[in-house]
Amino acid sequence: LKRIGVLTGGGDCPGLNAVIRAVTKSALRAGLEVVGIEDGFGGLIRQQFRPLNLAAVSGILPKGGTILGTTNRDNPFKYPVLVNGEKKYVDMSQTILDNLAVAGIDALVVIGGDGSLSIARELHNKGLRVVGVPKTIDNDLSATDITFGFDTALHTATEALDKLHTTAESHHRVMILEVMGRYAGWIALESGVAGGADVILIPEIEFQIENVVKKIEERCQQGKKFSIIVVAEGAKLGENLVVQKVIEDSGDPIRLGGIGQRLADELERRINLETRVTVLGHLQRGGSPTPFDRILGTRYGAAAVEALLEGENGVMVALRTPDIVTVSLAEATGVLKRVNPEHDLVQAAKAIGISFGDE
Ligand code: F6P
């Protein structure tokens, strides 16, 4: 092993630079050369390679985003090309293997969520030497206790709930905060508990609008004329289970978001309080990573290089508290980690009176 490449795939995520820095620093100390791949898997096809040295990663630890660029769209197995003015999707995986061989890159560290790590798994099946690092604010990878980026998103969502509390109370309003998380309710659940929400609505627990109304009315009767609702972007009014079934059957992405406003419209028809919606959106992906994410990213980056040096291949580094371990990419991809309605945090939240709209 002489030269390794590092790339970031999928959406950006706080802590990416901490991982890139740790991979680079630990690899250089082990006598390896490091090449940064720009703009994700597309950069492997287009040969966007640049050497990473200590100067290149200096000062990037607290920075959000990624110094390497990334993109959601480039899947080398379905890469869009124009043939006679018509868009066609072609398999460019062999080009990637050839480009890596020409550049003398012996192995790749792929930092990504389920989509990017699944691509890494397929490239590994075609012969690529690869180690994955679990990245996503959604925390929906099943093989690790936690993905880096989640903690920063959680902090941002919790801070938003703290701020919404003061304005909600002043105006006697119902404040709805819509958070990200894709098909998983982790950001909503944990920020809802940390931020003192009255109602938490997540994709994994089917809710009815009447139960949400009931909770708000109960609070009014107790003299509390404001309520805070946190809703996950993947939650669907009264049809959560159906939607999940569609996803599981087809694997097709369903357009997310908009649930906050739909919920507000339904509530305003049923209660005599003003309702306002805040969609937190990409604020959850931006900004400086928390100390937790900087530390986790550093541990993951160093562990990925160590795994390569020890001859491991086709694996993902994972946190199994308190250890960092490796798990095969085959096991780590394809099954998303969703909130189990029996999870003890859900039960604790219910025990203190938070409603999930299911009863
Ligand atoms: O997977 C991370 C995530 O931020 C999800 O929470 C969200 O649904 C999605 O990406 C948004 O993607 P985009 O940046 O393409 O709008």
Image (spheres, rainbow, N blue to C red):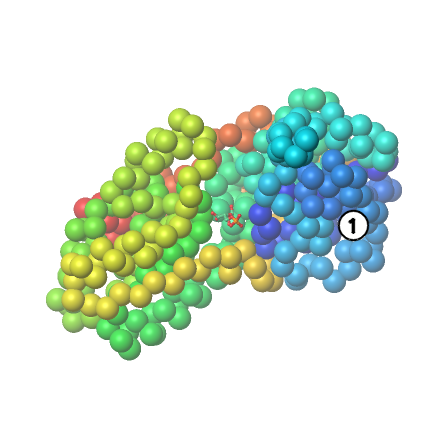
Residue reaching furthest to the left? 221
Residue 168, position as x, y percentages in the image: 30, 71
- Which one is nearer the viewer's eye here, 13 or 256? 256
Residue reaching furthest to the front? 84
- Which one is nearer the viewer's eye here, 221 or 115? 115
Q: Residue at x 18, y 56 (%)?
A: 213
Tell me if residue 268 comes above or below residue 128 in the rendering.
Answer: below
Q: Residue at x 64, y 51 (%)?
A: 16
Residue 207, position as x, y percentages in the image: 25, 45
Q: Residue at x 30, y 34 (%)?
A: 242
Q: Residues within 10 Å of mark 1 (few under 14, many from 20)?
A: many
Q: Residue at x 24, y 42 (%)?
A: 238
Tell me if residue 50 comes above or below residue 264 in the rendering.
Answer: above
| Quadrant (top left, top right, bottom left, bottom right) of the N terminus | top right
Query: Which quadrant of the structure image shows residue 206?
Result: top left
Question: Is 63 positioned to the left or the right of 184 in the image?
Answer: right
Q: Is residue 103 visible?
A: yes
Query: Which quadrant of the structure image shows residue 82?
Result: top right
Residue 171, position as x, y percentages in the image: 27, 76
Residue 23, position as x, y percentages in the image: 74, 46
Question: Is 65 positioned to the left or the right of 194 in the image?
Answer: right
Count of numbered circles in the view: 1
Q: Is residue 295 visible?
A: no
Question: Is 93 positioned to the left or the right of 147 in the image?
Answer: right
Residue reaching furthest to the top? 126
Tell me if residue 145 comes above or below residue 331 in the rendering.
Answer: below
Q: Is mark 1 within 8 Å of ligand 1?
A: no
Which element carries disc 1, helix, strand or loop? helix
Query: Which quadrant of the structure image shows residue 131?
Result: top right
- Which one is nearer the viewer's eye here, 110 or 290? 110
Circle 1 is placed at which residue position? Answer: 25
